[in-house]
Amino acid sequence: MALIETAGLTKDYGPVKALDRLDLAVEPGIIGLVGANGAGKSTLIKILLGLVPPTSGRATVLSMDVSNEARDIRKVVGYMPEHDCLPPDVGATEFVTHMARISGLPRTAARERTAEVLRHVGLYEERYRQIGGYSTGMKQRVKLAQALAHDPKLLLLDEPTNGLDPTGRDEMLDLIKRTGTGFGISVVVASHLLGEIEQVCSFLLAIDAGHLLRAAPISTFTQHTPVLAVEVEEGADRLTAALVGRGFRARQDEACVLLALEDERLYDAVRDAIADLGLALVRIQQERRRLEEIFRDAAPVAGSAP
Amino acid sequence: MTAEVAPPAPQPALTAAIELVNAARWYGNVVAVNDVSFALGPGVTGLLGPNGAGKTTLLHMLAGFLAPSAGTVRVLGRSPHRDPSVYRQIGLVPEREAVYSFLSGFEYVRFNARLQGLADSDAAARRAISLVGLDDAADRAIGTYSKGMRQRAKVAGALVHDPQVLLLDEPFNGMDPRQRLAMMDLLVQMADAGRTILFSSHILEEVERVGTEILVMVSGRLAASGDFRAIRALMTDRPHTISIRSSDDRRLATALMADPAVFAVELKDGSLAVQTAHLSTFRRLVAGVSRAAGVRLVEVVPADESLESVFDYLVRR
Amino acid sequence: MSAVNSTATGSPSGSIYDLGYRHYEGKHLGRGYALWSLSVESFRSVWGFGRPTRAKAAPFIIAGLYAMLAGLQLAFSSTIATEIQSGYSVQLLTYDSYYRQFDFFMILFCVAQAPELVCRDQRYQVLPLYFTRALSRLDYAVAKLAALTSALFVALIVPMIALFVGDVLMKPDTLAAIGDEWPKALPALPACLLVAIGMASISLALSSFSPRRAYAAIGLVAYFLLMEVVPAAIYAVGHGGQVNWAWSDDLLLLAPTTTLASAVNWFFGTALDSSLPSTLSRGDFLVAAIASAVVFSAILLLRYRRISA
């Protein structure tokens, strides 16, 4: 069953077309959603949540239509907004319990689920203190907790690592990965940070100017290229010469030697050449493509970035 | 998307454009910056640290908003505190700042140019707008901008007077991938032209991209400074980990373990993690040992040389 | 080591319990429950429950002051009773005039608490979290209205109860008095309900337009003040000296608390306040009060339907 599907989805805000006949279909999993600012990411999320009606076209979430089954969709979807959305004068437990009840959980179940979910996101004694005194990391965790409290099948996370320091980011990304794989919940992560999308997501949706730019598994964007990079502390020039001498195509790039990986015997030749020359080997690695290349390559559509 | 306008060459800079000696700043009992000393010259330096480590306070001291409670802060040889002549040479992009949303991008940048007393504020504003790639949207109200565009407008406002020193607090916040790449390129360009740029960021992959010089603050103190690769080499109490994939991991593991330079080998699923305290020695022996054992090396990757790894160590110390 | 975990053969055993994420298998109650939950939570927050202690100060003190005089009357009921018996006439507080006399406190209550109910969620941008749940936008507005109305109703009815008890205690035969008095007191119920919804709808509708509590409060104060003073002033001008602006009488129907207080008279069948023109009947005020409640409720619902989240 498709997780999310849209057909000809369009949203106009007067003269500005936020979404323009968007067609996409994604399967359950951890999905990264990227796009330039103003490309339509937030609009898409709002439409899927039923916050904003589409101008035309269809969209379904877990086979439910956003136009007339929005309330049913919201029962099984959890949303973590990008912006601050927590009142400062209540405690996390109270707030999440309240939200769980608004999602339809009976009082006792709401309390129990809240306690469980706060544990899963890593909030311990802090949960009884007022949210106003929390650090950014703790606030992000509360936002995630309220999205999870009613046990959704799909989580929509908008810039979940916003404002977090490197340690906090790692922890949040780890949590997201566990949620997507271990907890059996599908996750859509909207983010500008391609590095974290590569790290956590298995599928990529790239939107540009209201259209679908790319929709494919992440692996297609991070494939190995047929180039082997060999880095040595010094003597890269001698290594290049030695390998060329053995009949391989090689090019030096500062401390690195880039080789065309056509034949498995290259590995042995590299090893032997290094051992013979007595060089210090830093790295042997097959080059991979990076996600950002799709943005470097794709020419910006005229009039897209508002 | 970035205009092909090269930043004009600035006057020759002093060796230490920014210099702090035992600088400190406290608020009552809270010591935000504690006994920090460093010197920076032209180039890009990343200012890293957990939230609350004092990075913003440090940047504000450098920009002249805050006087140090102790020690000295010098920018281009003078103390910036309340010295408008030094402000002329400094551009600051603060993290949180409400810009007047009714002004257009161009008006806002020109306003900054006028505040700096520039002779031809219009031209300077247009140039700055081009540099950050906001030409198309320059005449719209800032209130209609996305977060990333607002950031770029702030950067333009900070560069319009062509300062020698540029201080940026989380400048990439809210920018999409293309805008980030463009901004990183711009910073590198400006640094190459001789400016001193200090920017704080939590996105270590990007900091690594822009340069290798870093300053790491933890709880108000300076935990490390300099080239992060050199810093890594100094972390001698932490063995280096190298991840290896080969044609026969177990055989290679046994062979490597025989060498005194290696003190631990971990067999993981599909790879080996080798720990050594003598990185250079290990690097020289690994090819030979593999050959002798008849094992093909498919991948050899240092597992903890990244900035991420260095940062993690410094913060947890 | 205890032998608790030993099996029959004597070798120790133990278990590790799965603390992994568990899915929720229980029931999901629907929209009605969500509406009820929000209403109850909001009602509690009007009185300051679920918030720091100082949040309870304002509502309880104000409601307490409002009920105070009725309470005094109750406390001194035996004294008053003897006064009446010995022939002294005593100006007593009555059901129908109580609100008119002390509406100031209820205005204060609304100014203090209505912004709390609707401004906070806007200010801290919590609305998207509500609107992406089982609740619809209108449900949210209805819940807030129900909460403030109930809270006001409680605040209004307490002095009525105090008066009733006081009245009963003043009579020599208490049990018979109850039988006699309660039909006289009964109209207090619908009357207080109308006043409650009347004030709640105005307060919430106006407050909902600002995310800042201070501005909302000022807006409410301005509304309640100006809409009482201005029609009265125009009426006075319109009937002074040579002019006779008959239409200025109808303006008084726009004055919020005057209208509500006069509508209360309709429920009790008592005469309107003497300062009001004879052109306006109790029925007019009742209709005006109901219309006002409907209009402001509609404004509130419309506001939440269109607010961006």
Image (cartoon, coloured by chain):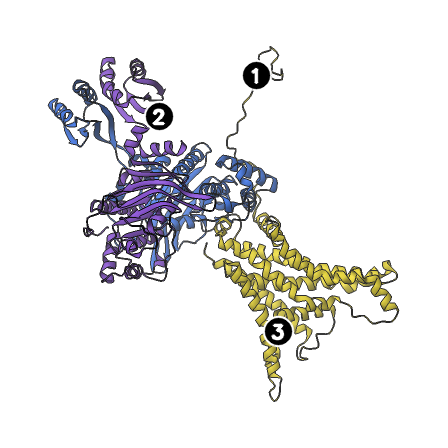
Task: Tell me the residue that label 2 is attached to.
Answer: B238
- Residue A35 visible: no
Q: Amino acid at mark 3?
A: Leu
Instruction: Report the quarter where the N terminus of chain A lies.
Output: top left
Q: Most extreme residue toward the left, as rendered?
A: A245
Q: Chain of mark 3?
A: C
Q: Is residue C274 above or below residue B13?
A: below
Task: Tell me the residue that label 3 is attached to.
Answer: C253
Q: Are marks 3 and 1 on the same chain?
A: yes
Q: Spot the purple chain and give its letter.
A: B
Q: Amino acid at mark 1?
A: Ser
Residue C140: x percent and y percent? 54, 54
Element on which disc 1 rests: loop
Q: Which mark is residue C13?
A: 1
**How far is disc 3 from disc 1 in space, using C-alphas?**
82 Å
Element on which disc 3 rests: helix
Q: Which mark is residue B139?
A: none
Q: Chain of mark 2?
A: B
Q: Is residue C229 above or below residue B128?
A: below
Q: Are marks 2 and 3 on the same chain?
A: no
Q: Most extreme residue toward the top, as rendered?
A: C9
Dot 3 alpha-carbon crowd within 10 angstroms: few under 14, some 14 to 19, many 20 or more: many
